Image (spheres, rainbow, N blue to C red):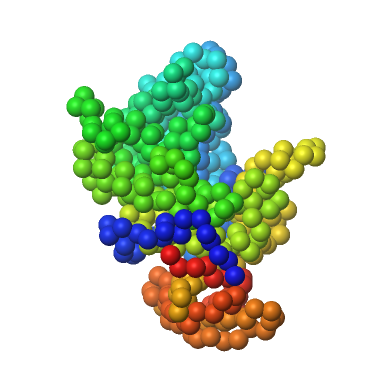
């Protein structure tokens, strides 16, 4: 029995977000595979993504990785609005064209690190990127993918120093929001110049928590939008272009109900903080009103990660709970899975913290073995236990019309599963039902696909209702 004691009140949603999103879609990100030089790996991964019924993938295009002489402090002589002048687009071309050939939409996040020659002081690849050069680069990218990309996002985690510096000045005043604001405006001008003015552009892509090195996401949001702590906008700032706010609502090993102590952090369990901030920003005229949220990068890390990792069963459970939180939030339009396979261990590293310093949030281990989260992603299940009843919620992937699932239960101490009931999904594959509360009981879902393939989700424990 899973008893989540930490801040279960986070599930109590305010009236503004009490109704579930009716159009939430799934975004999948698998950079190790989709940007691979191995055509078979790319094809297999797209087969799996498509087999889940996922119609979106996210690709992060790093400016530094495609630019000529990217590590030089001296800019080469070339037309930086001409896409043919950039030598490194090949692997992105493949990923985008192969996804689109299957009818999969691509969200292209254009981000730093940047060429050294495209920064103000030309000392590294993340400090003060030149907005004018970024505008011309966005023009080049927009021209290259004009007929292939309609959805863009600007900068991966700009509140994190790995992607944008400086985050603070010497007095700990945030600097990155102001730098990012100029990059967003430059991106908008660049896309307009490339003929992509009617495309959708998402902004933010913020990391979930602030530290002494990272600016907290809501502090970053306010700074980017020229808002003070009371969400009053400076009159000198115009409305920032953007069709959605992207965020990475990662949590910690305590699970999806973890409440970070800083009110400016936004993990999945306190997602309504971002709801409230965007509503206030919209009312202040800083962004469009009713700006939707896109959770463009999310995952639950499992062992052998020694910082945020949990067991494979908890990974499947926590991911399902997180998806349900997002589903119940009407402002959330997209929810993501990052990764397909865990990052590779660091070669030669013997210290576990160093060896597993990447992300272990995949549905497969780094060597390709299927985790419990794999079928948990296909058949996510949440069991919320109250004093008298347990509420069950789930989803079938692919959700291509109404279908029937079978819910089983297993009593504590037993290895035998018993049929509880069958339930019809809605047309998007979602379903919910209730049963009598039984402490220690586990549940699972079985589903037979239209082609006759039978799937069984992992055992799922209940947690207490708030």
Task: Using the image as rendered, state which of residue 53 and residue 42 is in the foreground.
Answer: 53
Left or right placement of residue 132 versus residue 379 in this view: left
Residue placed at 34% from the left, 64% from the top? 20
Task: Using the image as rendered, state which of residue 352 and residue 95 is in the foreground.
Answer: 352
Check the image and report above or below for 319 versus 309. Answer: below
- The total number of labels drawn is 0
Left or right placement of residue 390 versus residue 223 in this view: right
Task: Using the image as rendered, state which of residue 78 and residue 255 is in the foreground.
Answer: 255
Q: Position of residue 312 (x, y in %)?
A: 65, 61
Q: Position of residue 224 (x, y in %)?
A: 34, 31
Residue placed at 41% from the left, 23% from the top? 173
Residue placed at 31% from the left, 40% from the top? 242
Quadrant holding the N terminus: bottom right
Q: Position of residue 319 (x, y in %)?
A: 53, 59
Check the image and report above or below for 69 versus 203. Answer: above
Q: Position of residue 313 (x, y in %)?
A: 63, 64
Left or right placement of residue 48 versus residue 160 in this view: right
Quadrant holding the C terminus: bottom left
Could you tell me if residue 101 is visible in this image?
no
Check the image and report above or below for 181 versus 52. Answer: above
Residue placed at 66% from the left, 59% from the top? 311
């Amino acid at each position: 029995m899973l008893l989540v004691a930490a801040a279960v009140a986070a599930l109590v949603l305010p009236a503004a977000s009490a109704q579930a999103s009716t159009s939430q879609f799934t975004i999948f990100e698998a950079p190790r595979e989709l940007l691979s030089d191995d055509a078979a790996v790319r094809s297999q991964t797209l087969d799996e993504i498509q087999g889940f019924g996922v119609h979106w993938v996210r690709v992060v295009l790093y400016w530094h990785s495609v630019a000529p002489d990217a590590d030089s402090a001296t800019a080469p002589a070339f037309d930086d609005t001409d896409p043919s002048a950039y030598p490194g687009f090949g692997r992105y071309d493949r990923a985008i064209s192969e996804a689109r050939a299957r009818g999969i939409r691509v969200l292209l996040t254009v981000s730093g690190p940047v060429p050294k020659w495209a920064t103000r002081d030309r000392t590294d690849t993340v400090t003060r990127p030149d907005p004018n050069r970024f505008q011309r680069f966005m023009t080049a990218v927009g021209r290259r993918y004009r007929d292939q990309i309609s959805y863009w996002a600007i900068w991966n985690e700009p509140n994190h120093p790995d992607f944008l510096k400086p985050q603070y000045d010497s007095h700990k005043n945030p600097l990155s929001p102001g730098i990012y604001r100029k990059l967003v405006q430059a991106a908008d001008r660049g896309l307009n110049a490339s003929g992509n003015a009617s495309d959708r552009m998402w902004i933010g892509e913020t990391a979930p928590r602030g530290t002494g090195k990272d600016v907290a996401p809501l502090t970053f949001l306010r700074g980017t939008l020229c808002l003070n702590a009371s969400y009053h906008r400076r009159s000198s700032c115009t409305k920032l272009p953007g069709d959605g706010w992207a965020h990475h609502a990662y949590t910690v090993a305590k699970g999806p109900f973890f409440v970070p102590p800083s009110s400016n952090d936004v993990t999945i369990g306190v997602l309504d903080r971002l709801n409230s901030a965007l509503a206030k920003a919209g009312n202040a005229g800083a962004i469009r009103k009713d700006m939707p949220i896109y959770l463009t990068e999310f995952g639950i890390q499992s062992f052998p990660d020694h910082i945020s990792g949990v067991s494979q069963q908890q990974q499947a459970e926590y991911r399902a709970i997180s998806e349900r939180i997002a589903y119940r939030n009407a402002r959330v339009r997209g929810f993501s899975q990052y990764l397909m396979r865990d990052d590779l261990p660091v070669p030669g590293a013997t210290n576990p913290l160093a060896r597993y310093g990447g992300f272990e949030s995949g549905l497969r281990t780094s060597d390709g073995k299927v985790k419990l989260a794999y079928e948990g992603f296909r058949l996510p299940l949440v069991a919320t236990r109250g004093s008298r009843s347990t509420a069950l919620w789930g989803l079938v992937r692919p959700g291509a019309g109404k279908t029937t699932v079978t819910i089983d239960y297993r009593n504590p101490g037993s290895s035998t599963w018993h049929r509880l009931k069958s339930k019809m999904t809605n047309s998007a594959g979602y379903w919910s039902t209730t049963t009598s509360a039984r402490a220690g009981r586990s549940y699972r879902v079985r589903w037979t696909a239209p082609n006759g393939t039978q799937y069984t989700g992992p055992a799922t424990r209940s947690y207490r209702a708030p």
